[in-house]
Image: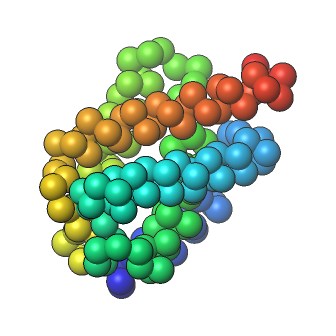
């Protein structure tokens, strides 16, 4: 629990003080979408299939903490710092960097005891993280089309 709380504080501080390249309304939409994506993914993979979970099997209110604080702040950081106007190679490298960071964070979360695998493994995470990150990018693209800013 200490690692989780420490991570929440660090993620919030970094997200608050990182330079903002995206407008506030996009950052707000990204944060909300990250929460929805987190709940959707976890309801399916944690509660329905029991592949992984937070603390113990089933619904645990402490398990809401990463979804409500880690997911939106990391989503905002990922999207805010994404190299949109750079060559595709740099964008793929950025995506790979966030995937590696996510795998390391997952490992530390398991080592600290607030997260566990139950039929899930790091290889599945390594394949899943890029798709979740790309889904974040797709969401922003759709938002910009909807708002007429793209």
**Way the structure is coloured:** rainbow
Residue that lies at the very extreme toward the top in this rendered image = 87
Relative to 123, residue 114 above or below: below
**Residue at the (55%, 31%) spot, across then down:** 137
Relative to 37, residue 54 above or below: below
Q: Position of residue 37 (x, y in %)?
A: 52, 48
Q: Is residue 16 visible?
A: yes
Count up the numbered dots.
0
Relative to 38, residue 145 above or below: above
Q: Position of residue 89 (x, y in %)?
A: 38, 18
Query: Which quarter of the picture shows residue 92?
Result: top left
Q: Nearer the viewer, residue 99 or 139?
A: 139
Q: Is residue 6 visible?
A: no
**The N terminus: image quadrant:** bottom left
134 horizontally vs 118: left or right? right
**Residue at the (36%, 34%) spot, across then down:** 130
Q: Position of residue 85 (x, y in %)?
A: 59, 20
110 horizontally vs 45: left or right? left
Q: Nearer the viewer, residue 6 or 20?
A: 6
**Residue at the (24%, 76%) spot, across then down:** 112
Residue that lies at the very extreme toward the front in this rendered image = 48
**Residue at the (74%, 27%) spot, across then down:** 144
69 horizontally vs 120: left or right? right
Q: Nearer the viewer, residue 44 or 73?
A: 44
């Amino acid at each position: 629990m200490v690692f989780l709380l420490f991570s929440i504080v660090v993620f919030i501080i970094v997200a608050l003080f990182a330079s903002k390249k995206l407008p506030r309304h996009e950052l707000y939409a990204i944060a909300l979408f990250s929460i929805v994506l987190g709940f959707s993914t976890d309801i399916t993979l944690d509660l329905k299939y029991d592949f992984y979970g937070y603390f113990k099997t089933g619904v645990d209110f402490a398990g809401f903490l990463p979804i409500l604080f880690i997911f939106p702040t990391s989503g905002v950081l990922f999207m805010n710092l994404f190299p949109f106007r750079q060559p595709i190679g740099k964008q793929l490298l950025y995506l790979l960097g966030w995937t590696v960071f996510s795998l390391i964070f997952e490992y530390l979360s398991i080592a600290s005891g607030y997260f566990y695998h139950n039929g899930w493994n790091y290889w599945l995470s390594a394949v899943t993280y890029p798709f979740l990150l790309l889904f974040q990018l797709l969401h922003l693209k759709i938002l910009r089309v909807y708002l007429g800013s793209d």
